[in-house]
Image (spheres, rainbow, N blue to C red):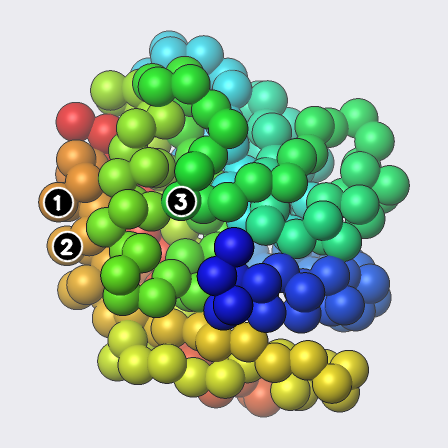
């Protein structure tokens, strides 16, 4: 494992309990986010390719109950063993595993869809094509992918300091155009794009992209 990946993994091990405390129930207060996830669920079921979906970069596992309520069968993977530990503890009815976005533990074309909820914001430039192609590899033709992300200029920025736990890591906020181009080049076609304006105490807008595997 390279030094930056190790730093990212170690930082999120430390942040796992902090995320549990600060993100608990937050989806209930986010109607736009719920609407986007519900659209993903509806389109995935309508495609009749099965119910198995990957929650890639699942963090604490907080999306699993919502995806299941939408009729899907999610399996979460995350780089951080600490995140996976709390996900298994807090959501014991779901499957979670430690895995790297660049080498996913799914068979080719085995999933009806994939969720990448703020999990594509850590990719160094050299890893981006690898990661997007890996997502395309595991989704069945006609299946769907949905992602939420903070749009930006793609330059490196340090994250983690605001938690006050003494950890930092590199993040990259890709532009909406680059995000869409990356998915197109990997074999996805955009179905839906949206942006949520900045709210109080936020540093960025939030963008959403839903795409279909061609």
As drawn, is 204 to the left or to the right of 211? right
Rounded to the nearest angstrom, the CA distance separating label 3 from label 2 is 18 Å
Instruction: Give the answer, above or below, for where 164 lies relative to 48.
Output: below
Q: Residue at x 79, y 26 (%)?
A: 93
Q: Disc 2 marks which residue? A: 181
Q: Is label 1 in contact with label 2 (beta carbons under 8 Å)?
A: yes
Q: CA distance from mark 1 to mark 2?
A: 6 Å
Residue highlighted by disc 1: 185
Q: Does the residue at mark 3 contact the one at mark 2 (Cβ under 8 Å)? A: no
Residue found 59% across the figure and 28% down from its top: 74
Q: Secondary structure at mark 3?
A: loop
Nearer the observer, 89 or 102: 102
Image-based side of 64 in relation to 151, left or right: right
* Above or below for 78 versus 126: above
Between residue 165 and residue 21, name the one nearer to us.
165
| Residue at figure coordinates x 54%, y 49% from the top left | 57
Q: Quadrant of the C terminus?
A: top left
The x and y percentages for residue 136 are: 28, 33
Circle 3 residue? 102
- For the residue pair 11 and 184, the one nearer the viewer reads as 11
Residue appearing at x 67%, y 69% in the figure: 11
Which comes sooner in the sequence, label 3 or label 2?
3
Q: Choose top left, top right, bottom left or bottom right for residue 21.
A: bottom right
Secondary structure type for disc 1: helix
Real-space Cα distance between discs 3 and 1? 16 Å
Which class describes the residues within 10 Å of circle 2: few (<14), some (14-19), or many (20+)?
Answer: some
Of discs 3 and 2, which sits in the foreground?
A: 3
């Amino acid at each position: 494992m390279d030094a930056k990946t190790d730093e990212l993994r170690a930082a999120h091990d430390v942040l796992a309990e902090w995320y549990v405390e600060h993100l608990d129930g937050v989806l209930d207060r986010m109607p736009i986010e719920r609407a986007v996830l519900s659209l993903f669920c509806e389109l995935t079921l309508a495609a009749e390719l099965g119910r198995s979906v990957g929650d890639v970069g699942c963090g604490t596992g907080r999306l699993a109950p919502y995806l299941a309520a939408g009729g899907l069968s999610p399996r979460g993977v995350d780089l951080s063993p600490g995140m996976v530990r709390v996900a298994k503890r807090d959501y014991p009815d779901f499957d979670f595993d430690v895995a790297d976005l660049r080498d996913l533990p799914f068979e080719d074309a085995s999933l009806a869809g994939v969720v990448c909820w703020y999990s594509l914001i850590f990719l160094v430039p050299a890893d981006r094509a690898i990661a997007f192609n890996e997502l395309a590899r595991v989704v069945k033709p006609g299946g769907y992918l949905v992602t939420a992300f903070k749009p930006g200029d793609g330059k490196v920025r340090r994250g983690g300091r605001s938690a006050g736990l003494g950890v930092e890591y590199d993040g990259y906020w890709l532009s909406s155009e680059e995000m869409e181009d990356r998915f197109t080049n990997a074999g996805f076609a955009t179905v839906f794009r949206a942006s949520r304006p900045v709210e109080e105490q936020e540093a960025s807008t939030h963008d959403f992209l839903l795409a279909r595997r061609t």
